[in-house]
């Protein structure tokens, strides 16, 4: 199984690559400017990144092409979920209270991504912006005390997004969340 990690300039993109590799999948990092026809994978992770989606959406490169054209499971992390929301018609921008450090995530709907994960867990956050409105055809999977959308998924396709960082060691159940995503990529 091959998973592409699309590098959006995040400080922990290498950790996403490593977690996927540690879980037994082939893990390849590619810049977000990689042409669509060079993406050949069983799943794709849209990494977090330094671009503020609401201010500089062009810095997210070809993420929109990947979302529109790849028929494999996709997981967007941090800037990845924010881009996903805007791309599909929702809204992202400055949240009422930026989240940095450990926050409690409340799972509202375990769906496939949070299968077997506790209803409440600690996750690492590092964001000023967040999803303010999910797109039509999506559902919210989790929230925190300060952010209404900590995770969401598209109803018709296996496209998921999380605001927190499951790849860092401070996030509880991070490997389990990635395992659930990889299980979707096997089908």
Image (tube, grey):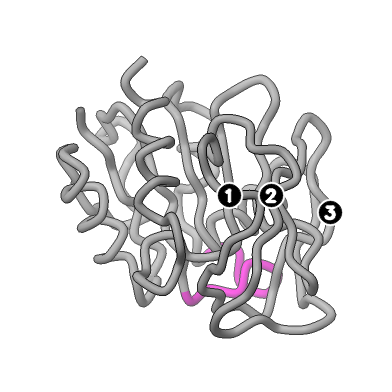
Q: Is residue 98 left or right of residue 3?
A: right
- Element type at marker 3? strand
| Crowd rating for badge 3 (residues with CA inside 10 Å; few <14, some 14–19, many 20+) | some
Question: Mark 2 and mark 1 in contact (Cβ < 8 Å)?
Answer: yes
N-term mark: 3 or 2: 2
Q: Quadrant of the N terminus?
A: top left
Question: In percent of the image, x 32 and y 41: which residue is there?
Answer: 35
Instruction: Looking at the picture, tell me which residue is in the foreground, 80 or 20.
Output: 20
Residue drawn at the location 65% of the way across and 69% of the way down: 104
Examine the residues drawn in magenta and state their main secondary structure: loop
Q: Give left or right: position of 66 versus 40.
A: right
* Residue at the spot 71% in from the left edge and 83% down from the top edge: 98
Percent x, y of residue 25: 18, 37
> Is 89 in front, or is 101?
101
Which residue was labeled with disc 1?
A: 118
Residue that carries the numbered disc 3 in the rendered image: 133
Q: Earlier in the sequence, mark 1 or mark 2?
A: 2
Which residue of the protein is positioned furthest toward the top in this rendering?
A: 187
Look at the numbered disc 1 and give the secondary structure of its residue.
loop
In this rendering, the count of numbered labels is 3
Give percent across and percent down for residue 109. Answer: 72, 38
The quarter of the displayed image where residue 32 is located: bottom left
Asked whether 53 falls inside the magenta stretch, the response is yes
Label 2, secondary structure: give it: strand
Relative to the observer, which residue lies in front, 78 or 35? 78
Position in image of residue 148 (x %, y %): 81, 60
* 43 over 96 or under it: above or below: above
Q: Residues within 10 Å of mark 2 (few under 14, many from 20)?
A: many
Q: Which residue is mark 2?
A: 107
Q: Which residues are magenta?
A: 50-58
In this rendering, would 3 be left or right of 89?
A: left
């Amino acid at each position: 199984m091959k998973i592409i990690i699309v590098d959006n300039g995040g400080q922990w993109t290498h950790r996403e690559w490593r977690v996927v590799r540690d879980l037994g999948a082939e893990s390849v990092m590619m810049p977000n400017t990689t042409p669509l026809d060079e993406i050949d994978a069983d799943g794709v992770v849209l990494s977090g990144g330094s671009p503020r989606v609401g201010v500089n959406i062009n810095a997210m490169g070809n993420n929109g092409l990947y979302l529109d054209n790849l028929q494999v499971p996709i997981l967007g992390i941090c800037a990845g979920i924010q881009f996903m929301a805007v791309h599909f018609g929702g809204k992202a921008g400055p949240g009422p209270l930026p989240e940095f450090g450990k926050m409690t995530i409340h799972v509202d709907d375990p769906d496939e991504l949070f299968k077997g994960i506790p209803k409440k867990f600690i996750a690492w956050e590092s964001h000023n912006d967040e999803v303010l409105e999910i797109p039509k055809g999506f559902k919210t999977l989790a929230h925190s005390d300060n952010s209404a959308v900590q995770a969401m998924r598209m109803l018709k396709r296996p496209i998921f997004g999380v605001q927190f960082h499951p790849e860092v060691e401070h996030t509880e159940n991070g490997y389990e969340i990635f395992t659930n995503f990889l299980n979707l990529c096997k089908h």
